Image (spheres, grey):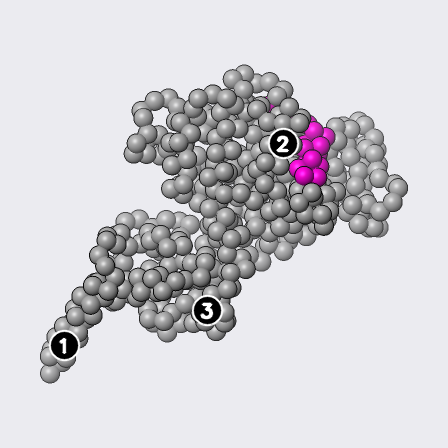
Amino acid sequence: MPELEVEVIPQGDRPSAAEAQQGLEGQPPGVEQAGESPAGERWHRADTANGIPYYLDHEQGQTQWEHPKVLQLFKTIEGLNDIKYATYRTAMKLRAIQKLSNLNSVNIHMLKTAFAELGLEGAGLAPSASSSTHMSVPELEVVLRKVFGLAQQVNPDLNTAQCTELSLNWILKCFDSGRTGRVGVCAVQAGLVTLCHCTLEEKYSYMFERVCGGRVGLSHSSMNTLLRNLLLLPQLVSESKAFSAKHVQEATESCWNTEGVEPTNVVSKLEFMRWAMKEPFCLVWIPTLHRLASAETVKHEAKCAVCKTLPIIGFRYRCLKCANTDLCQNCFWTQKTVRDHKVTHPTKEYCLATSTSDDLRDFAKMLRNKITRRYRRKGPKRSYLSYPLVHGGRERSLQQSEAEHIHTNLAQLAARLRDQEGRGEGGGE
């Protein structure tokens, strides 16, 4: 499939009021006259000859490509730039888009059904460039209307017209910012499944199937196309500096170089899934978004050591160096510290409430770090997280074996701590 050229439209290149009235591409656009516009009383939607929506402000005599609510959202998420870490910053911005368009009410079955009814479910990346690899804006709108119609059957309060229009707008902004009137089927499917409500395994499986288009494996070129399509989402929220297309080739090679992958020209679905679940750099924002949605309303019976919030809601971060030091996600993401705590300390992220075994395990690690300081990593730091981090019980900064019994470990560590304190007192005399 030929690569889709995507460029951000400068403010000055948007259609003027005069152009809107005369019509774009030589055709007069149709303006909604009857009733209230989906965009509100002030703004009215119009469509170009090939069905691309734009919005007219009759009070100011202005036009713009973006839906007013989408434009307002992008202004609002600029406030998230205070988050120091690109992976969380990107996930938070995409979560805002997900909630605005209510894609968290959509599941994979709904996506498959909607695309299948239009004959696009198995389009994939055809061996030769054909019309089946792309869809028009009206076709995309039909698919979205069907998707949210199915979602409304589960959630009757869903405003399908508004969800369809908002989703259509951000999809065009992301995958067809040049407003050519045609978008790649696989690009749209990748974007929708990334923001819909399903497991990570389901997301990656769907991506693989759509890109392969019935073939037995994923080729280098197909992998490159998939990753470039996915990286348009961070680009949409101005995070292309951290998650740039320049990492695509490196990520593709890392998949083929993963242990257990056969040295062939294609990777199987199982091999691709194993690679993706290891959270490669260019895709790390996808599982972060998944955890963010899961942890959003979780309450932790702990107080933030910085802002004193009790209970902590959302992510909870426990320092594995300082005793009794927990941070809420806002303080952690903005690198706020307290007492002797430093941002370089090993930290454990919790999406769900902790158990007694979690508390004992973390206490053992805290004692070990106080004695050995082995949490300090000698390898290069990742650009999207500048310190060792543990996600939801899976440690990354500490690689020691967990096979020893917790209570035995605690006893040994406590004894070593007493010995070290005794030597310190002796040296002071």
Q: How many residues crowd around disc 3 within 10 Å: few (fewer than 14), some, or many (20 or more)?
A: few
In the image, residue 14 sits, relative to residue 355, either above or below, namely: above
- Neighbor class of circle 1 (other Cα within 10 Å; few <14, some 14-19, many 20+) is few
Residue 251: x and y in percent read 40, 35
Which residue is depicted at the point 64% across and 47% down?
A: 102
**Residue at the (34%, 22%) spot, across then down:** 264
Give above or below for 328 relative to 4: below
Residue 183 visible within the image: no
Residue that carries the numbered disc 1 in the rendered image: 422
Mark toward the start of the polypeptide (2 vs 3): 2
Mark 1 lies on a secondary structure that is helix
Q: How far, Cα to Cα, is label 2 from label 1?
A: 70 Å
The three-letter amino acid code for the residue at tag 3 is Glu
Image depth: mark 2 or mark 1 in front:
2
Question: Taking 205 as reference, is 17 left or right?
Answer: right
Query: What's the residue type where badge 2 is placed?
Result: Thr
**x and y, in percent, of residue 73 in the image:** 65, 52
Q: Nearer the viewer, residue 66 or 217?
A: 217
Quarter in which the C terminus is drawn? bottom left
Q: Give neighbour class at mark 2: few <14, some 14-19, many 20+ (Cα, 10 Å).
A: some
**Residue 45 located within the stretch drawn in magenta:** no
Magenta region, mostly helix, strand or loop? helix
Residue 110 shows up from this direction? yes
Asked whether 281 or 421 is in front, the reply is 421
Residue identified by numbered label 3: 301
- Magenta segment range? 133-150
